[in-house]
Image: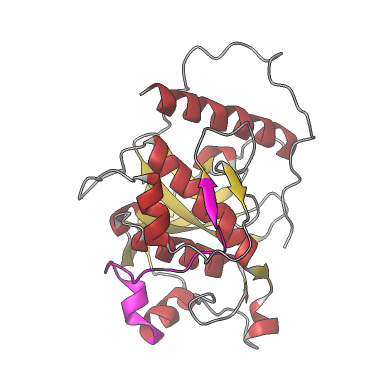
Amino acid sequence: MLRVIPLAAGLCLTGLPALAAPPSPPAALELGPSVKPPRGYVQFCRREPTRCGGRQAQSVALPRVPSLDLQPSAVGPSAGTLNSVSGEPALSSEQVAERLQVDAQPADGPLRMSLALWTLLKTVNSQTNAAIQSAEDRQTHGVADFWDTPLESGRTVGDCEDYALEKRRALKAAGVPPHALDIAIGVTPWGETHAVLLVRTSQGDYVLDNLTDWVRRWDLTGYEWRLRQVGGDEGRWRRVRAAPRARSAAALQLTAAVSDRVVEDMLNAM
């Protein structure tokens, strides 16, 4: 799959207009009528019912992250400096959550955004992207559409919905309430149907996407949204009402960089 080209090295944001306060959180994706879940997701739930519902997952072995420097990072897609030290074992998602000290979250409604949650989202997104090699289902399963959690099955290849399912599994195992983790389907600017993980937070709906390590708000992706899961419920899916497509890829990358810095500055000040 295509990957978003990172910002040019050394990009300086000091020439941008002053950012006195973070932008107001946007409304969540506006929901339309109920629809049937995607067929591939239904088949996944029938094959693996314990992986499909809202139950708490087992501890998930995330890709190798021997040590975490959790000081706020410079503008960029990483969640901090991830330093490799040979010989150390991979961290489970529970260990990542413990190091990040993820705070208690409400039993219902959007997640309360915090620096710990923000860092966890970025870490899970980038590490899962690095752990799975993108491949079409026809190559790996011999069918057009096959949803799965490849890392759990000992494989390291998958397509967009597989990344989304693995990220949801990792976040659930780290203690993130499943009601705030929804699969969403959109269309990319180049016309490809694409699945991502949508995380509902007090700062808006954020997207964990295998095409980029940036964790972006839904309106900064450039996607035309079509349908989404509701409340993490495997049987509740809704159409998404038409929303204007965002700006060019370059403008989106720059906006994502600014948004990333603003969110971290705001959370560090709390």
Identify which residue, 63 or 223, lies in the foreground. Answer: 63
Q: Residue at x 62, y 70 (%)?
A: 159
Residue in the image at 37% along x and 69% along y? 59
Please tell me whether the stretch drawn in magenta is mainly helix, strand or loop.
loop
Which quarter of the image is occupied by the C terminus? top left
Residue at the extreme left: 107
Query: How many callouts does the rendering have?
Result: 0
Q: Quadrant of the N terminus?
A: bottom right
> Eyeballing the image, is 197 above or below 24?
below
* Image x and y of residue 46, in percent: 37, 84
Check residue 66 for magenta coloring. Answer: yes
Give the quarter of the image for residue 16: top right
Q: Position of residue 43 (x, y in %)?
A: 43, 82
In the rendered view, tell whether residue 86 sits above or below residue 146: above
Location of residue 37 by image quarter = bottom left
Q: Reply above or below: 270 against 241.
A: above
Residue 241 visible? The answer is no
Q: Viewed as shown, does residue 39 lie left or right of 176? A: right
Q: Is residue 114 covered in magenta?
A: no
Residue 35 percent across, percent down from the top left: 38, 64
234 vs 16, left or right, is: left
Q: From which residue to which does the magenta span run?
A: 47-68
Residue at x 68%, y 36% (from the top left corner): 253
